[in-house]
Amino acid sequence: MHHFDYKDGVLHAEDVSIPEIARAVGTPFYCYSSATLRRHYQVFAGAFKKSQTLVCFSIKSNSNLAVIRTLAREGAGADIVSAGELHRALKAGVAPEKIVFSGVGKTRDELSFALRTGILQFNVESRAELEALNDVATELGTRAPISFRVNPDVDAATHEKISTGKKENKFGILWEEAHAAFDRAATLPGIKIVGIDVHIGSQITNLDPFSRAFQKVIDLIKELRAKGHTITNVDLGGGLGINYKAGNEPPPHPGEYAQMIETLMQGLDVRLLFEPGRMIVGNAGILVSQVIYRKTGANKTFVIADAAMNDLVRPTLYDAHHDIIPVQDPGSDTCVERVDVVGPVCESGDAFAKDRDLPPLAEGELMAILSAGAYGAVQSNTYNSRLLVPEVLVEGDRFAVIRPRPSYEDLLALDRMAPWLT
Ligand code: LLP
């Protein structure tokens, strides 16, 4: 459920018309709906009956400060993976005691910064990281609260590039080494074990892999507790998928996901933590682009958009499907034509859709690439010296530019001339 709908024949984000934003900021641009962000957060968080459940928005999916703050005001914590994301979470107003730090390659500087900040927990992913964290904490005269991220060796049945819970993936502690890791941690003066963590992948559209992984974690918790380890926080990661294609069977509702978890966890006295990203923000954002040209190839029609793979890389990188709709409602009886929607970047992989049946899109017309709120703007770059796309946040009948389009001066100012070339 989102708040991008046609009203009087024109696509709106909540009560703001998309052409109005286009006139104000130019194209392309990302547009997010506050009401959708809040709704998705509330549906997810509200699905869990336990009052002490903490939902840490995975800010890698969308790290704009205004987006994070919108969710923080609803009560969200943050799942971070770098010092940069910690800076963002704090600036957006997330309380340190609601921040969890994941990632396989946290540097000593990052560990130290997070320790001094007083975050809720470090999700430790290797024995080497455990030792480094112990050193840093000891130097600072403190104890680092940790969960081990365990790798349950479960196939999440998602795209291979976003699957993280199989033993050949780089993530988490090998299942067979989990006991030894907890035992070692218990001996270290700079470490305080607080829990366990698992995240098996992203865009998971079936509850089965989740329940298999979570059941393994529950068994492990019982074994660890029997040995005297304290497991209070159980972080079940993110990964719940969203619908990218109108008409497709929707992925499990957060309510079903929550029910599955609460049934599994019955009688286990734990505090549940979650790290959803896509589920909160994916369908809360669109990428608006204008048709620059149409071009007829040997056996294809190309619709050339002013957005490109550098602005939204998901179709290129993961063969991801994103629905595309015209901003002017074509009506239900319109004919369709089969086209490729491509960008201006000099790569054949620069395409948002191939052989897609779409209502005719004329030169100069605006289109919306849907479900672009997660892993869209955050994965954009300036390839082909294209300017980063601005981000706009809508709230009712208001909108604000929450990341302006840089100027060409800004772009060039990132480089420095070597002294011998001046
Ligand atoms: N927690 C951890 C430890 C993660 O690695 C991730 C995502 C999440 C939580 C959030 O997962 P979500 O709820 O959003 O599925 N760029 C890819 C997705 C990469 C996911 C990386 N990790 C894409 O566009 O599909």
Image (cartoon, rainbow, N blue to C red):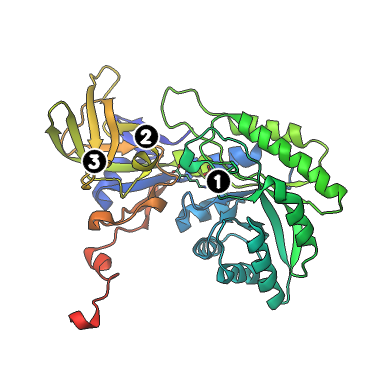
Q: In the picture, residue 340 is in which quadrant?
A: top left
Residue sitting nearer the eye, 136 or 308: 136
SS at mark 3? loop
The kind of secondary structure element at disc 2 is loop
Mark 1 or mark 2, earlier in chain:
1
The residue labelled by disc 2 is 322
> In the rendering, at what x and y percent does residue 405 appear?
29, 58
> Which residue is found at the position 33% from the left and 38% from the top?
369
Left or right: 49 with respect to 383? Answer: right
User: Of marks 3 and 1, which one's residue comes earlier in the chain?
Assistant: 1
Q: Nearer the viewer, mark 2 or mark 3?
A: 3
Please give the label number shown on residue 348: 3
Q: Earlier in the sequence, mark 2 or mark 3?
A: 2
Left or right side of 188 for 385: left
- In front here: 26 or 420? 420
Q: Which mark is residue 333?
A: none
Q: Mark 2: is the Cβ under 8 angstroms from ligand 1?
A: no
Looking at the rendered image, the quarter that the C terminus falls into is bottom left
Asked if one can make out residue 96 in the rendered structure from this viewpoint, the answer is: no
For this view, does 6 lie left or right of residue 294?
Answer: right
Amino acid type for the residue under numbered disc 2: His
Circle number at residue 169 = 1
